[in-house]
Amino acid sequence: MNTNNPIESLNEIKSIMQRTSKFTSISGWSGVWVGVVGMISAFIAYVLILQDALQVNYRGTLTPILMKNLEIKLFILGVITLVVACIGGFFFMTRKSTKDGVKFINPVTKRILRKFLFVLIVGGLVSLIFINNFSFAYVAPATLLFYGLALYTVERDTIVEIKYLAMCEIFLGLLAFYFIFNGLLFWFIGFGLLHLIFGIWMVRKYDYKA
């Protein structure tokens, strides 16, 4: 710390306090990764749904077996997407944390995870209730809405841009409830395209300057 220059000393103190109260080592490449994975997943989901639609047209009816098979396929796809997105996202964030000289696992990140996962788990349970009642059209809006709310609960603990992403996701979720039969399109935009744009913005703003 520079004791000869009061302004520099105050800036250093502010920087230290921010690092201990907020998690700022968010890599834009995490957003790019999640966005690409999300778009690929949405495309695969579209293909799976289209295949079942063709079978319905051929057989003339949507049988319970076809419905159950599609449900299982989409569930497996969702789990794989979540795992792959999380692995890549954590990889880029831990790499940036190391570069910034900050421990990735610390009291701040633990607090963020607790708050984020609580809302996300509630959203997941609501989605399972919709699925159990065969209200599949409500799953996409619900997941987008609760994901946005989960992001918004941690916006004070991280960079300000997370708040903008959260509000966009919440808006998309509400919009998806209105255009209820366009869920896959909103999924593609919310979990894919929006993350990709956000990630590129973050890379240009933070990663290239690091």
Image: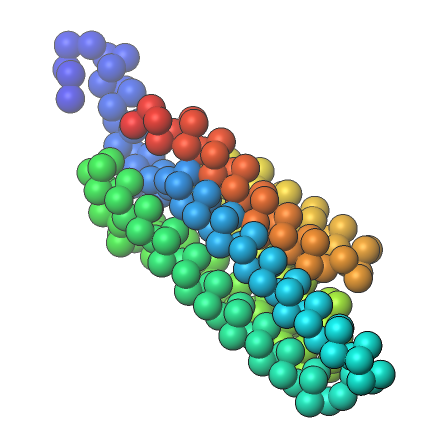
Q: Is residue 59 visible?
A: yes
Point out the residue furthest to the top here: 5
Which of the 4 image quarters holds residue 83?
bottom left
The N terminus - image quarter: top left
Q: Out of 35 and 58, give the one closest to the viewer.
A: 58
Total marks in image: 0
Which of the 4 image quarters holds residue 139?
bottom right
Residue positioned 58% across, 80% down in the render: 72
- Picture coordinates of residue 25 (x, y %)? 33, 40
The C terminus - image quarter: top left
- Picture coordinates of residue 193 (x, y %)? 59, 44
Residue positioned 26% across, 32% down in the render: 16
Q: Out of 111 and 173, give the one closest to the viewer.
A: 173
Q: Out of 158 and 48, give the one closest to the viewer.
A: 48
Point out the residue furthest to the right here: 60
Residue positioned 31% across, 51% down in the render: 91
Looking at the image, residue 18 sits to the left or right of residue 143; the answer is: left
Looking at the image, residue 198 sits to the left or right of residue 85; the answer is: right
Point out the residue furthest to the front here: 58
Vertical placement of residue 115 versus 201, above or below: below
Q: Is residue 166 visible?
A: no
Vertical placement of residue 154 versus 73, above or below: above
- Picture coordinates of residue 195 (x, y %)? 53, 44
Residue positioned 69% across, 49% down in the render: 172
